Image (cartoon, rainbow, N blue to C red):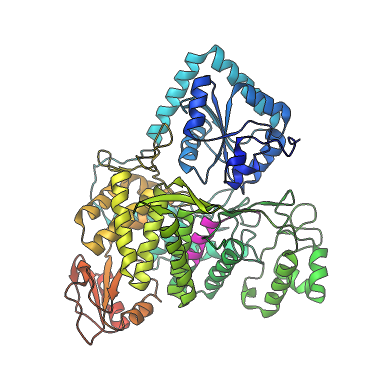
Amino acid sequence: MNQNKDDKNELSSETSPYLLQHAHNPVHWKAWNNQTLSKAQIANKPLLISIGYAACHWCHVMEKETFEDPEAASLMNKYFVCIKVDREERPDVDQVYMSAAQLINGNGGWPLNALAFPDGKPFFAGTYFPKKRWMELLEYFARQYNDNHIALKEQAEHLSNGIEKSSFIFSSDDEPDFHEKDLEQARENLESQFDLKDGGLAASVKFPMPSVWELVMELSFKDRNKILVQQLNHTLNQMANGGIYDQLGGGFARYATDRSWKVPHFEKMLYDNAQLINLYINAYQFTGNDMYRIIAEETIDFVLRELSSGKGFTTSLDADSGGEEGSYYLWTYGEIEKVLDKDTSYFTTAFGVVPGGNFEEGKNILHRVDIASWQDKKLEECRKNLLQARSKRVRPSVDDKVITAWNALMSIAFTAAARAFQKPAYLNRSKEILDFILSQLLINENELYRNYQKGNPATHAFLDDYAFLIKSLIAYYQATFEIKYLHKAKELTNYVLQQFYDSTTETLFYSNKTHPGVFSRPVEITDNVIPSSSAVMAENLFVLGTLYDLDDWMKCSVQMVRKLKQSMVSDPSYFSYWLRLYIKIVRPTFEIAIVGKNAQELLHQMQNHFLPDCIFCGDIAEQNLPLLNQKFKPGQTLIYVCTNKSCQSPVDTVADALIQMEQIRQQ
């Protein structure tokens, strides 16, 4: 049961929706900050660190079963300093204790619960625990802390050393060079992980993993490898037709709990949808499949409708509504019949709905069993009517934090949509996001904040915030040639190298050296549902080094790739973004300079094509970029196709430029 609604713990003064969800728990929760850690050290009490996020279903379950229970809360309060952490606000804290859970158990997840000494070094970590088991664990470790303190301290030191080492996954330099054969080996290793029956990668739980499928497109771009292209199409079709995709309102759930993408874990995250918009746009350009355009635009519509705050885009929609997971999205046959009447049979046949339910307790998850139905006007009308009826239900709650990194991903998606679909409104939304971040979340020129809540920035930014913001600024420049955004990307990159880069290990730390935050500064190397921030930053260095002719930045980028070469070739699904940069290093990367009064028109024509191996620059007049020097000729609009600082003869049509590039690719 809850405390009296007027009883509050220290979380009541926080702004995070996740922390505020726990403000009335009988647990004496505190926020993660220096003051809390100092109190723990003075009291010599161990830390109980519980980490989650607002849309997390099992976080809600553990709160209801355990954290709202007076008996469990009394035990927690007696022996521990209890700290609640929003993993989206403090991913640095989450990374450290997730590493501990993975080292102890071989896996992780949320809710993430760790026990640690007052200095933050953990001696235990796990995920969800039922109340009885949770209390048994707490009583055991409370005794160990008092009776076997030295042994427990040694265990914490050993685990902390393991956390430090796990951040660094470097190859030897025995083979420092880059070869096409490495890409072939990576391709073969990736193919061995394909689920040929249901699409995606072989696993019992299916995550979309957009970066993996972006890699598949780029690996097959040169030769249209049949196996890769088939698996790409199969995966994107399976996801679009499955229950992981909201068949009425657009947008994707975080993952599917089954192999066939039918049963979603119903929370919807901004970062997933931003990346999937980009993926389906690129796949539309790569394959010409119009269904992918529809999916991208429906998902954009979902983001605009459900996650727009007027101050950037919010973080997520909860998995639960009305106290039940997925209830907002599930339908009985009778509920559909009440809305659609005579069209019921037509719709239910197309979407796999049956009177007894295809899910739990007579409920149905909508999923397309008729792939040809995407252009069916009658089904479209049915979908609109059901969406309108659904809007009257209890809606999932929204985590209204505005996170810099995730909004930057959304800016990238809008820019891609504007380029592919020739819709200026999308480009305007991209610009609005960037201008909001630069005006509200950036202070002292280049010091960035991670999130915006209730009118104020909060939490110093991490590497992913900088990396994705820089990438989004570069993308916007390449779609508009507005040079101020590119210059800002360069300024921010200089700051990142000063504050995050360690020249000894040639590594980018995840946290700013001025604001370290945790006993261990994590390093984010491998890709997860979001690409590695180090990989994205390495790509930024490569692209900006090309545009500004900065050899040191290019060398830094290449060396970061070199150190991970063996890992990325042997395990491509965890290094997909690094491999996309590897492709840029091994294969020709084109610098496309477009200059003259019609530069924008030719840029738009060229960007109608899928061109992952191109870096664009240009304007209607000469700019102060090395790639544009001495290329402007009054009265003419010209396209220069360049590689390795050597340019082909200028041409004045996109068709001729495409021919030049294809000839070089096939050499």
Determine if residue 283 is in view: no
Residue 501 percent coordinates (x, y): 30, 44
Residue 73 percent coordinates (x, y): 68, 28
Farthest top residue in view: 147
Residue 652 on the magenta segment: no
Quadrant of the image containing the C terminus? bottom left
Residue 63 percent coordinates (x, y): 67, 38
The mark tally for this picture is 0
Identify whether 652 is placed above or below 329: below
Farthest bottom residue in view: 635
Magenta extent: 263-280
Identify whether 395 is placed above or below 496: below
Q: Quadrant of residue 175?
A: top left
Residue 49 falls left or right of residue 437: right
Q: Nearer the viewer, residue 384 or 660?
A: 384
Q: Main secondary structure of the magenta part?
A: helix
Q: Quadrant of residue 633?
A: bottom left
Q: Residue at x 81, y 62 (%)?
A: 355
Determine if residue 46 is in view: yes
Q: Residue at x 52, y 33 (%)?
A: 101
Quadrant of the image containing the N terminus? top right
Residue 513 percent coordinates (x, y): 34, 39
Q: Residue at x 52, y 46 (%)?
A: 88
Q: Nearer the viewer, residue 288 or 22?
A: 22
Q: Residue at x 67, y 42 (%)?
A: 60
